[in-house]
Image (cartoon, rainbow, N blue to C red):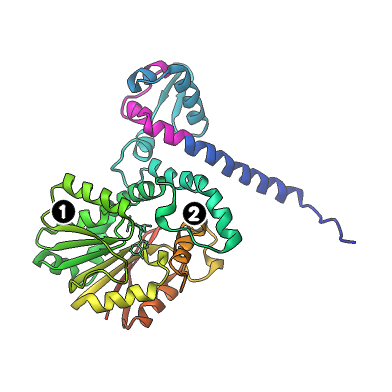
Amino acid sequence: MLDTPKIDQARLEAFATRAMGDVTAGYTGVMISLGSKLGLYRAMAGAGPLSAKEIATRADCADRYVSEWLNAQAAGGYVAYHELSDTYELLPEQAMVLANEDSPVFIPHAWNVPASMWADEPKALEAFRTGKGIAWGEHDERLSCGSAAFFRNGYRAALVPQWLPALDGVIEQLEAGIAVADVGCGYGHSTLLMAEAFPNSRFHGFDTHSGSLDAARRNVGAAGVSDRVEYALARADDYADGQYGLICFFDILHDLGDPVAAARHAARTLAPGGTVLLVEPFAHDHVKDNLTPVAQLYYSASTMICTAHAISEGGHLVLGAQAGQARLAEVFRKAGFTHFRRAAETPFNLIFEVRR
Ligand SMILES: C[S@@+](CC[C@H](N)C(=O)[O-])C[C@H]1O[C@@H](n2cnc3c(N)ncnc32)[C@H](O)[C@@H]1O
């Protein structure tokens, strides 16, 4: 007979409290999405203390709903509540996270990704049971639009001011004029940021998801840089050879079913003296070092999205979103590259310079 496991009461309470906190976060995500889509945060930003009624009027919403929502927000520390005046205030720091779409710490879009994961739970259940993949384009569309919008602000803060300058000599080449490939460009926010900064260069975005490319084309039209940006439906291992001075992989290599084939194609299509810019989720090489909240998020997304997509592409090498430097370097070594250097890092990204 098995012994009844001995329960450490303090450990049980600590863990149950933590797990309950995660449930609360799930509810909060829905409230954040409502507040963002309804313009409630924008109505409060910079306005100082306001009553629930005033906020409802500013956002053109029904005040009974808004007052309940505000209490949920105040209880979670997402807005301040002033008891004496019975008013609510979005503090400047909260506004940066919740109201300012251009802030590098703007969060609401990020909640589209778990929303898509919940919507796709039946597909994940089936995938776990059968071992089959789920392609990027098979997901609820909140995945592509949410992740693109979420990544955009990080790219805006870091790509041109920090990551490109961290690559040896690349800024000078971009200023002089080179061809650039953005492999798996998605909605093309990275392509666009580079095109706006370097008018002498030419930018080619490739992706296998036509819905994302449609959005990328709309974004280019709106930004007025269509003279130097074009997008094409193409796989990471078969896009047109443009003898690129820079080939970029933004958060895509680990999604591929055959990352080595993609790296080989980059080796073939890179101009002499060219550079590969590889941006991947921050990760250490070993699971034991990845037991952090950032890795919790990445491993979770990887389970349903990245790993599932790589399997849908044949799963020759399924890196997952926490591949780490050693395994990423090995991909490029196998493809014939000899130089692999960590050029920069953020709490969320690793940035590598790769050369033949
Ligand atoms: C996580 S998203 C990253 C998108 C974009 N690079 C960004 O950072 O916002 C991965 C992208 O890779 C694309 N993708 C997946 N497999 C691909 C393949 N074999 N060839 C080209 N693109 C692919 C997906 O359609 C999706 O747009």
Where does label 1 land, which residue? Answer: 196
Residue plotted at (44% across, 35% down): 32
Residue plotted at (48% across, 36% down): 30
Where does label 2 land, which residue? Answer: 297
Task: For mark 1, give the secondary structure.
Answer: helix
Residue plotted at (41% across, 56% down): 136
As drawn, 195 above or below 169: above
**Res 275 seen here:** yes
Q: Residues within 10 Å of mark 1 (few under 14, many from 20)?
A: some
What are the residue bounds of the magenta stretch? 31-54
Task: For mark 2, give the secondary structure.
Answer: helix
Task: Examine the image and state in which quarter residue 107 appears.
Answer: top left
Residue plotted at (35% across, 20% down): 60
As drawn, 81 above or below 134: above
Check if mark 1's residue and mark 2's residue have beta carbons within 8 Å: no
**Residue 347, horizontal then vertical, whole percent:** 41, 58
Residue sitting nearer the eye, 233 or 276: 233
